[in-house]
Image (tube, rainbow, N blue to C red):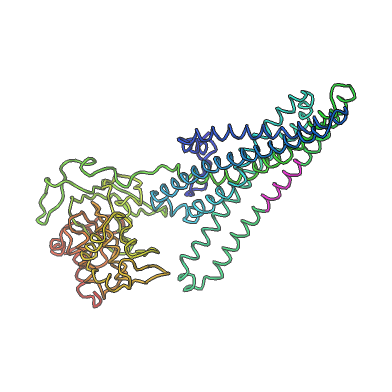
Amino acid sequence: MSDATDTPTGAFPVASGSRTWREVWRISRGRRLGLVAVAVLGVASAAIGLVAPAVIGSLVDRVQDGTAGPGTLVWATVAMVAAALAGAVGTALTVVLAGHSYHAMLAELRELLIHRAMALPQGVVERAGTGDLVSRSSDDVAQVADAAPQIIPAFTITGFTVAVTLVGMTVLDWRYGLALVVVLPVYVITLRWYLATAPRIYGAERAAMSVRAQQLLESQRGHATVLGFGLAGRRHQRVLRASWAVVTHSLRARTVQNMFFGRLNLAEYLGMAAILVTGFWLIGAGQSTVGAATTAMLLFLRLFGPINQLLFVVDVLQSVLASLNRMVGVIAIPTAAAGSGDADDAVDTAAETTNADGARDAAASPSVRLRGVGFGYGDGRPALDGIGLTILAGEHVAVVGASGAGKTTLAGVVAGIHEPHEGTVTSPRRTAVITQEMHVFAGTLRENLTLAAPDATDEAVRAALETTGAAGLVDLLPLGLDTPLGTAGHTLTAAQTQQVALARVVLADPELAIFDEATAEAGSTHAELLDRAASAALRGRTGLVIAHRLSQAMTCDRIVVMDRGRIIEDGTHASLVAAGGRYARLWAAWQGSPGR
C-alpha cells in the first residue's frame, strides 16, 4: 500500500492508514511502558466489574434454595460496594494514564505538523491552498483533541470490559458464551459495512471543510480588493456554496451514523433472546440454575453500554482517522533544505565572478551559486530560464528589471521558498528574507525584534535598532521595548515597520540576507533613511537585493539586470551605465523621474 492516497493535483496529500499508523507508533516511543500500565489497569478494573453480576446470581440461587439469611445480604452488599469502589479507582487511574499518553502524543504530532508546514516551500503551499493547511492545523487537530473524552474510555475501560465479560460468560457455562455467536455476525456485518462506507463520507466532509476554510481565508485576506472591485456578492456566493457543501457531507455522515446505530439495536435484541432461550433450555435440562442464568443475562446487559460505546467510538474514530491521515499527509511531505549545506562544502573552493574591471577573481569563495536554474508557475511561460549566477561571500548583488522579469522568483529560489524545476541552487543554511509585505506580530516590540533571536539581550536589541537608525523608536513608544504592538496595541508607521524588520535581520545575523523590495512600502518620503538602514543591515554579510529604487542598486557591488526570466546584464553600476544597455536606459529614466 502506498503511503498517500490519490489527491487533486497540487493539493496536500492524505496519508494512507499504514503510513499514519507508522507515524503514531514512532511517536509512542518513550511512552510504551505507560501504555502497558494502562492495559494492566484496564484489565484489572474490568475483571473487578464481574463481581456484582456473580454476587447477584449467587444470591438468587441461595434465596431459591432457602439458604439465604440477613448475613448473606450483608455479605453481598459489602462485596458489591467494595468491588464498585475498587473498579472506580482503577477506571479513573486507567483513564488518567491513557489521557496523559494520548494528549502527549497528539501534542508531538501537532508540533511536527507545524514544523513541517513552516518548512514547506512557498510554492507548494500556494498550489495546495493556505486554507487547506489552516484547516489541517486547526480543524483536524481540534477534531482529534475533542474526541479524547470518547476515545480514551472506549479503548481502555470499555474495550477491556467487553473482552473480560465475554471470558466470564464462557467460564460460567460455555453454552452461554456460545449463545453470543448468534450476535457476532450482526456486529461483524454492521462493522464491515460501516468501515466500508464511513471513511469515504468523513474524508469528503473534511475536504469540504478545507475548501470552506480556503474561501473564508481568501475573502478575509483580500477584503480591500473585494470591496474595491465590488466583489462582495460574488465572494459571498462562493462562501455560501462551500458552506452548503459542508452541510451536505455532514448530513450524509449523520445518516450513515443513524443506520449504524439501528443495526446495533438489532444485535442487542438478538443477544438477549439468545441468552433467554439458552437459559430456559439449560434450566429445564437441569444443567444450570436460575442464578447462573441471571448472572449470564446481567453480564450480557452489562455489555450493552460498552459495546455500543465502543462501536460508537468506531464512528468517531473514522472522523479522527480522516483527520490524522490529513495531518500525517503534511508531515510526510518530503522537504529539501533551503540550502544544500555550507557554501564551502557544496561548491568548488574557488569560483569566478566579474569584478569592477571585468577581470576574474578566483580567490574568494562563493556563498550563492545557481547553475542552469529554471522555474515556472504552471502557466506555460518559465519565470526563470537557464539562470546562472554566483555571489561571493560578503558580496552585495542587486537585481533590477521590469515588473514580471523574474526578480522576486529569483529571490524565492535562492531562499529555498521555491524549488527549481531544473538546475541546482546552493545557498547558506542561515538565510533571512525580508519582503515588502512585512508583518508586525501581536506582542511587544521586544518580542517582535527577537523572533529569530530569542536569546538576544536588551543591549543587543538596542544596538540593532541603532544600526538601522531606529534607536529613537524606543523613546517614542509609551512603554519602550515592552510596548504592545499589533491590532490591539500600538500601530507602527510603514517606515518604522521596515526598520523593525531590518533590525530583526541584524539580530538574526544570517550568512545571507535577501531583501525583496524590503524598503518599498514606505514610499519616497523615507527612502534615503531606509536605504541607509538596509545597507547597515547588510554590512558584514552576503546580500541579494531586489531593488525597487536604483539608488539601492548603485550602492551594491554588482547589479544583475533581468528580463523575461533571464539575466541579460551583469556588472557594476559604472560598467553597466558605460555599456549603454538596458540598465543604462533604466538609470537615465530614473535620473529624470521627479519622484525618485
The residue at the far bottom in this view is: 594
Would residue 118 appear left or right of 246 to someone viewing this image? left
Q: Is residue 594 visible?
A: yes
Which quadrant of the view contains residue 173? top right
Residue 456 in the image, given as x and y percentages of width and height = 27, 56
Residue 159 in the image, given as x and y percentages of width and height = 64, 36
Give yes or no for residue 257 being in the magenta stretch: yes
Would residue 228 appear left or right of 79 to someone viewing this image? left
Query: Residue at the spot x=51%, y=51% of the render?
Result: 136
Q: From this view, report whether residue 220 is shown above or below residue 476.
A: above
In the foreground, 461 or 129? 461
Which quadrant of the view contains residue 383? bottom left
Q: From this view, report whether residue 338 is shown above or below residue 494.
A: above
Please report the bounds of the magenta region as a residue range.
Answer: 251-264
In the foreground, 204 or 314? 314
Query: Residue at the spot x=40%, y=70% of the render?
Result: 489
